[in-house]
């Protein structure tokens, strides 16, 4: 999203997603399960964890999909307790902010 413009989704893409995942499993404003705009309270740790994984997984060139899956799996299995605690602490902080600020939380992230 840029400058507050809503995301656009083409019909062929919706059909492809539906074919692979099922209409009821897709979270989007264009499907039955809508994802609220600017809702960091609903996905607090995913970005932090995936950001870490991207840094370590994409450290070098990836030859094919099998190698990508292998690297992701290996790095998940090799995550340190310190990294996992950091992710959990971040989740707790985000939920505390949501609890303290209610709907206004959407304006601070």
Image (cartoon, grey):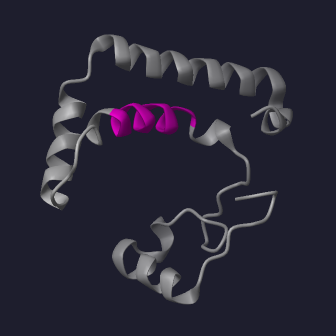
Residue sitting at x 47%, y 86%:
15
Q: Residue 49: within the magenta?
A: yes
**Residue 18, image x, y percentages:** 44, 79
On the image, which quarter does residue 3 sit in? bottom right
**Residue 40, image x, y percentages:** 66, 39
Q: Nearer the viewer, residue 8 or 23?
A: 8
Residue sitting at x 57%, y 34%:
44
The span picked out in magenta is 44-55
Residue ranking furthest to the top = 82
Q: Quadrant of the C terminus?
A: top right
Residue sitting at x 67%, y 75%:
8
Q: Residue 63: within the magenta?
A: no
Image: 76 above or below 72: above
Q: Nearer the viewer, residue 100 or 84?
A: 84
Tell me how many marks there are: 0
Predominant secondary structure in magenta?
Answer: helix
Q: Quadrant of the N terminus?
A: bottom right
Image: 73 above or below 13: above
In the drawing, does residue 99 fall left or right of residue 13?
A: right
Residue sitting at x 73%, y 48%:
38
**Residue 43, image x, y percentages:** 56, 40
**Residue 101, image x, y percentages:** 83, 25
Image: 81 above or below 2: above
On the image, which quarter does residue 57 sit in? top left
Q: Nearer the viewer, residue 51 or 102?
A: 51
């Amino acid at each position: 999203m840029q400058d507050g413009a809503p995301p656009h989704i083409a019909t062929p893409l919706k059909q492809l997603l539906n074919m692979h995942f099922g209409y009821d499993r897709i979270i989007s404003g264009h499907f039955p399960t809508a994802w609220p705009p600017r809702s960091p309270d609903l996905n607090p740790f995913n970005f932090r964890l995936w950001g870490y994984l991207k840094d370590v997984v994409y450290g070098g060139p990836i030859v094919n999909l099998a190698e990508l899956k292998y690297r992701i799996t290996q790095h998940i299995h090799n995550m340190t307790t310190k990294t996992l605690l950091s992710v959990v602490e971040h989740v707790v902080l985000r939920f505390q902010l949501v609890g303290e600020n209610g709907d206004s939380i959407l304006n601070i992230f």
